[in-house]
Image (cartoon, grey):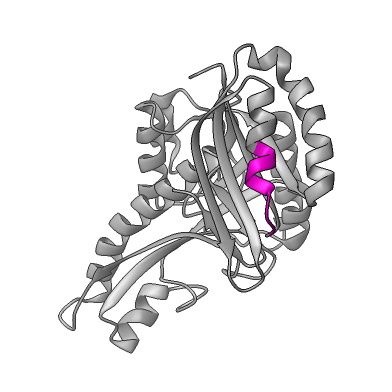
Amino acid sequence: MNMERARLLLTCADRPGVVAAVTQLLYEQGANVVDSHQHTEPDDLRFFMRLEFDLPGLEARLPVLERAMGPVAERFGLQWRLTPAARVKRMALFVSKQDHCLQELLWLWKKGELAAHIPLVVSNHPDAREVVAPFGIPLHHVPVTAETKAGAEAATLELMREHQVDLIVLARYMQILSGDFITRFGGSIINIHHSFLPAFVGANPYAQAHTRGVKLIGATAHYVTAELDAGPIIEQDVHRVGHRNAVEELVRIGRRVERTVLARAVAWHLEDRVLPHGNKTVVFS
């Protein structure tokens, strides 16, 4: 990890001079921009930018740079976030019985392709313990029933606080998180839904797709909001199917799509490439 590299993400109303002001400030601070992406949303003329830059002595000079950003942010009405690339996020993985997405994320993490710390895995079933054990990550079994849901969520939130978790990934965690949990966590939660949203929300989407005779099935990674399967979409993909495919075949095919879609979305979030915008996202991939 480059200890001198940082990422600057910002958004504001589109107007002349934003890019010039920000890059001039970085130049004056001795930074070298190594990657830059911009986007203006045509519907509301909202401007988005992601910069990566190198700055010698970054850790010591970061407070100075943050103070220098203040006047520029006030002048242009910027919402901004400055993050050292070496500041790795702490990610908790949630899973139920189906472990294909969990295994994909753990394998990529082991290979160094997901820049995250994974302090724990949470499951409402004990089935994934053998999958997680070889990676040296503790699995916390937190059973959930209709009667114990509130207590289970409270226990899970305590685990998130204890391990200072920045990101929760629902890797086929087949429990609906309450609005209270989402609010109290106060961080980012990414879910993988096994359909091409907004089609076939809720349970059994492959059966719903088969009933409708669809020719494409897909998967959607999105941020979690209180409204079921309606949060801002990060990534999607599809696979062509036909009338000969039974529901079981759709499930098997869909699992491959789910794994890759979730992995891409998680990687982009960890690399600060995703900027939410209302019920959309801008993804600088």
Residue 108 showing in the rendered view: yes
Q: Is residue 24 above or below residue 283?
A: above
Q: Is residue 171 above or below residue 112?
A: below
At a point 43% along the width and 73% down the height, the residue shown is: 204
- Of residue 34 and residue 108, the one placed in the foreground of this image is 34
- Of residue 158 and residue 83, the one placed in the foreground of this image is 83
> In the drawing, does residue 198 fall left or right of residue 226?
left
Q: Position of residue 228 (x, y in %)?
A: 61, 70
Q: Position of residue 285 (x, y in %)?
A: 44, 48
- Of residue 115 and residue 71, the one placed in the foreground of this image is 71
Q: Is residue 63 above or below residue 230?
A: above
Name the magenta segment's main secondary structure.
Answer: helix
At a point 35% along the width and 68% down the height, the residue shown is: 218
Q: Position of residue 223 (x, y in %)?
A: 59, 57
Q: Looking at the image, how many numbered discs can be counted on the residues?
A: 0
In the rendered image, residue 16 lying in the magenta stretch gets the answer yes
Residue 148 showing in the rendered view: no
- Of residue 199 and residue 2, the one placed in the foreground of this image is 2
> In the drawing, does residue 74 fall left or right of residue 123?
right
Q: Position of residue 212 (x, y in %)?
A: 34, 88
Q: Quadrant of residue 12?
A: bottom right
Q: Residue furthest left?
A: 244
Q: Residue furthest bottom?
A: 212
Q: Is residue 2 above or below residue 234?
A: above
At a point 71% along the width and 61% down the height, the residue shown is: 178
Which range is magenta?
A: 15-22
In the rendered image, residue 123 lying in the magenta stretch gets the answer no
